[in-house]
Image (cartoon, helix red, strand yellow):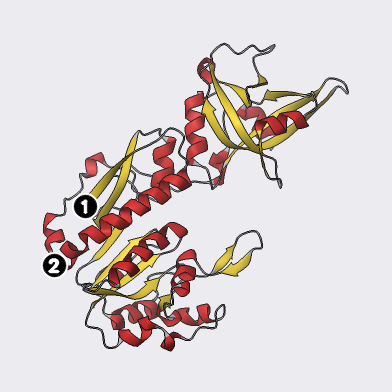
Amino acid sequence: MNSSMMLRRFFCFNAASTPAASSASTSKKKPLVFLGSPQVSATVLDALFNAAAAPNSSFEVAAIVTQPPSRRDRGRKVMPSPVAEYALDRGFPSDLIFTPERARDETFLSSMRTLQPELCITAAYGNILPNKFLNIPPLGTVNIHPSLLPLYRGAAPVQRALQDGVKETGVSLAFTVRALDAGPVIACERLKVDDEIKAPELLALLFSQGSKLLIRELPSIFNGSAKEKAEPQDDSKATLAPKITPEESWLPFDQEASVLHNKVCAFAGWPGTRAKVTVIDDKNSSCNILELKIVTTRVCSDGNIHRNEADDIVFMEGALVFPCGGCTELEVLEVQLPGKKVVSAAAFWNGLRGQKLKTMTMETSHMTA
């Protein structure tokens, strides 16, 4: 099915009436194709739209490539990607929004060749680009990558950096080559990492910075000087940021609190972090296992927490304090039960009505999964 027709199923849209459509055939500006999918990509697209609309602009956004419509949000309705939604809201022609299942599809590649873009820009597109695509734009394809390349090449650079507890990260503007995130770097911006920042916030911040970096460097990309100044990456210093799996979301409390806190910050949004705890009711002599989503944490600075037993979870100053490896403590400030809303640690503790909480080892936790 034609990618633009897929979008027309969701939107009744008259492309010919838009300013973008009416000027496309007469404009002498250099055509640029943008590829992106999630909400953070829309930040980059917005910057490109605004820059293209400037009186002295030398380029226009000729087409947008994004992931196909998918089921998302609580209603699980089939919806276009956030980038497609944003573009349509801005009045961009629906027949210039392409949603190929794979970037190597010949029909899609043929459409790109017909458009003859001078340059392609990618920002969290989510599809591997084949050489047949990379050979189309004469000025190449430039990617906004949220790390200081060659560090954290791969699908989850922000999450893996936070998981490692880095104090500094950044965003890189680099030419795309067939090898993963390995192309020459045009420019980068550094950013200090706050101990409490979560992955979705840091991702948004880095793509916002990346948008400004891109607009600043576009003149040099268009005149060819960016290719001359771009620095080849030192592959010996490369680190990988593989895709996160749901199985990684469990918190092993035999690890130190700082490691677990970093993981909570890194996996915020998706897939989140989970823990199984034992709930003991001394009155009824009952013992139940409860699965919790751990939403917000901090490393406890007080090393003198009184516990009757080593695996007791205590409540202190608005936090559930979990014993961790290396005699460290993790303060859990917000939790979520399956199918319920996020609640404060205090609200959760009050709901226990005097029942006790204990941590579970990973071995025991997996036995009860």
- Secondary element at tag 1: strand
| Residue found 42% across the figure and 45% down from its top | 202
Identify whether 239 is placed above or below 218: above
Identify whether 265 is placed above or below 95: above
Category of crowding for the residue at label 1, using alpha-carbon neighbours closer than 10 angstroms: few (below 14), some (14–19), many (at least 20):
many
- Tell me the amino acid under the disc marked 2: Asn
Point out the tag, 1 or 2, that comes first from the N-terminus: 1
| Residue 42 makes an appearance in the image | yes
| Residue 176 makes an appearance in the image | no
Observer-nearest residue: 24 or 260? Answer: 24
Left or right of residue 210, residue 163 in this image: right
Residue 263: x and y, percent? 49, 35
| Residue found 62% across the figure and 26% down from its top | 319
Identify whether 8 is placed above or below 51: below
Q: Which mark is residue 324?
A: none
Cα separation between marks 1 and 2: 17 Å
The residue at which mark 1 appears reads as 185
In the rendered image, which quarter is residue 186 located in?
bottom left
Residue 317: x and y, percent? 62, 22
Q: Residue furthest front?
A: 55
Left or right of residue 224, residue 285 in this image: right
Observer-nearest residue: 282 or 347? Answer: 347
The residue at which mark 2 appears reads as 223
Observer-nearest residue: 112 or 343? Answer: 343
